[in-house]
Amino acid sequence: MDPVVRDAPLLRGVGDAAAEALMASMTPVDLARGDVLFSEGDAGDRLYVVVAGTVKLGRRAPDGRENLLAVLGPSEMLGELSLFDPGPRTATATAVTRVALAGLGPDDLERWLDGRPEVARHLLRALARRLRRTNDSVTDLVFTDVPGRVAKMLLDLADRFGHPAAGASPDGSAAGDDGVRQVPHGLTQEELAQLVGASRETVNKALADFTARGWIRLESRGVVLLDAERLARRAR
């Protein structure tokens, strides 16, 4: 049983036999970096669990501007709204890295959900968390300046995709620094800017400032958090 898929909200709180029954009906999907899983406006008929890699969800304005809504990693779900509210996809899902997913169609899900109300509760919690995150993002756009939003984004990426930096001990300490985290997020600076709803120039300025203060170290499509505590204070 794949532990990454097993940890998805869809399968939390259910027995191994029930989880194996659902996972047996899932279809593997592999994407290369840059491949589109589905596009905004497509008919939605499947949900997906990320097994490995990173997927971004974005929307495009009529004038061509893009907005990055979310970045999803292992054990996270996407596309589930279409199973509960049939209609066109509300975003485009694109592979940021090489990606492996497990797909599930509505018929298999509905059969499996019958008689398992606890699974429906877990799905509702997952949807509620996503709505809460959306509400927080809207609030940040109104009340938080760009450097604060950038700091908060870096902490969120570190929490979800980070790991102790090379040479760090298992508790995350390295070279006398506590909590040094390497975050290979795979995003370009343009995508980071889209994620916080700001221009690339403004976000670059914030990242340069954090670097000069010794809070972070920038890497190619990644960042090392050297002082998460100061970033957290700046994010408030």
Image: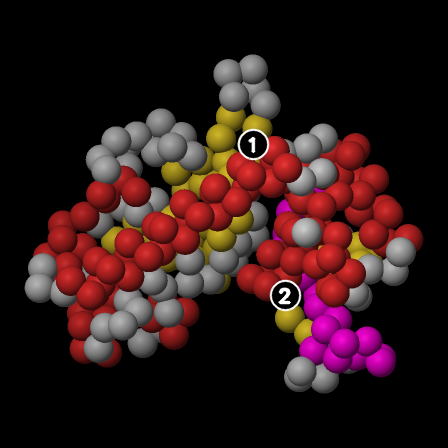
Q: Nearer the viewer, residue 190 or 225?
A: 225
Q: Is residue 7 left or right of residue 222?
A: left
Count residues near mark 2 (Cα–Cα under 10 Å), then give few for <14, some for 14-19, many for 20+: many
Measured as percent of width and height from the top left, residue 182 is found at 71, 66
Q: Which mark is residue 67?
A: 1
Span highlighted in magenta in the image: 172-189
Secondary structure beneath dot 2 equals loop
- Which amino acid is tagged 2? Gly
Q: Is residue 108 left or right of residue 216?
A: left
Quadrant including the N terminus: bottom left
Q: Nearer the viewer, residue 149 or 181?
A: 149
90 magenta-colored: no
Look at the image and tell me whether residue 184 can be seen: no
Where does residue 65 sit, x and y in percent of width and height? 59, 23
Where residue 218 sits: x, y (%)?
80, 55
Q: Upstream in the sequence, badge 1 or badge 2?
A: 1
Kindly identify the amino acid type of the residue bearing the numbered disc 1.
Answer: Asn
User: Which residue position holds label 2?
Assistant: 162
Whole-angstrom CA distance, mark 1 to mark 2, is 23 Å
